[in-house]
Structures are given as C-alpha cells and as structure tokens.
Amino acid sequence: MADLDNALKMTYQEVGRSCGAIEDFRAKLLGLLPLASGTGIFLLLNGSSNDLVRKPFILAPIGLFGCFITLGLAVLESRLQRRNGSLIQAGKWIEEKSLKLPGPFMLRAPTNSIGNRLAASIIYPAVFSAWLFVAVFALLPGSWWPAVIVTPLFLVSACLAEVYQSCSMNEDFRSNTLITSRADWKLDQ
C-alpha cells in the first residue's frame, strides 16, 4: 500500500508540474503572438503606398503564411486546453481519493467563459484577421475593401471559436467524468 501511496504522490507532483508548464506556455503564447504579429505587420506595411503597390506578390503570400501559422497555433492551443483540463481532472481525483483533502486542483475556480479560453477566442481570430488583411491589402492596395472583408470575418470567427471551445470543454468534462467513475469502480473493487 505504501508503494501505491508513493506512486500516487509522484503522479500528483508530475500532474501539478505538467499543468503549470502548460498554463505558462499558453500564457506566453497568448501574449507574444499578437505582439510579434503586430510588429511584423507594422514593419511590412510601413512605407509609402507606392512601395506597397510594387509588393503585392510578396505581401500576399506573407499574409497567407501568417494566417496558416496562426491557425496552427490555434489548433495547438485547443489541444493544450484539452490536455490541461484532463490534468486538472486527474489532480482533483488524486486529491479526493488519495490525499483526502482539498488541494490546488479542488480549490481551483470553476471554469467559465472568462479567462484563457475567452482570450484565445479573441486573440487567435484577431491575429488571423490581421494577417488576412495583409494578404487582401496586398491585392487591393489603397482600397477600403480589405477592412470590409476582414472585419466581419473576425467577428464571425471569434464567435465560432468561442462556441467550439465551449462545446469541446463540455465534451471533455463529460468524458473525464466517465473516466473518473470507471477509475473509482476499479479502485473500489
């Protein structure tokens, strides 16, 4: 039994470390992505309109590249959110079943729509839209069409990102609850 307690304690420590590392990485990513993208876009578009008219075949691919990188990072963010949610559920289970006292996982504020999830739902569509603006602006320089195209796209994609994240969080909660009940059943027998 002592070996099981030691294994649970080591697992609990690793869950805590992993959860902290994921949250730290996500916070840095959410902070640095708009800063780096904003700086890059400013430097790309900083110049006279004559320079921009001559660069459409450079700016359009750069804008599309920025869009794809942002989409990839948004997918990574979604994966990290799900992984972190699973780690939190595991930490709660260990606190409840083994430690028999509330710890940082059980005392954690309940997940709601305010926080990292909402920030991600705003930041990724905003950065994607900014890079898309660069691509469209390169093809239609000096026109107001890029803003007309990108602004509604940002609003729709931000709403869709929030809906997707809400649905995936609810699905993760249901699946984690099911896994926890199975683990309880196996441990009790």
Image: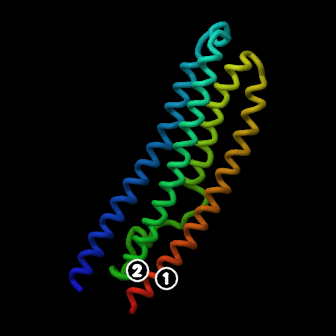
Is 148 above or below relative to 31?
A: above
Question: Which residue corresponds to mark 2?
Answer: 96
Task: Determine the secondary structure under disc 1.
Answer: helix
In space, the residues marked 1 and 2 are separated at their CA atoms by 13 Å
Q: Dividing the picture into quarters, in which one does residue 103 lie?
A: bottom left
At a point 61% along the width and 67% down the height, the residue shown is: 170
Identify the colour scheme used: rainbow
At a point 72% along the width and 43% down the height, the residue shown is: 155
At a point 59% along the width and 42% down the height, the residue shown is: 124
All told, the count of numbered labels is 2
On the rendered image, what quadrant is the N terminus found in? bottom left
> What kind of residue is marked 2?
Glu
On the rendered image, what quadrant is the C terminus found in? bottom left
Q: Residue most toward the bottom?
A: 189
Q: Is residue 14 left or right of residue 121?
A: left
Q: Dividing the picture into quarters, in which one does residue 57 lie?
A: top right
Residue 156: x and y in percent read 73, 45
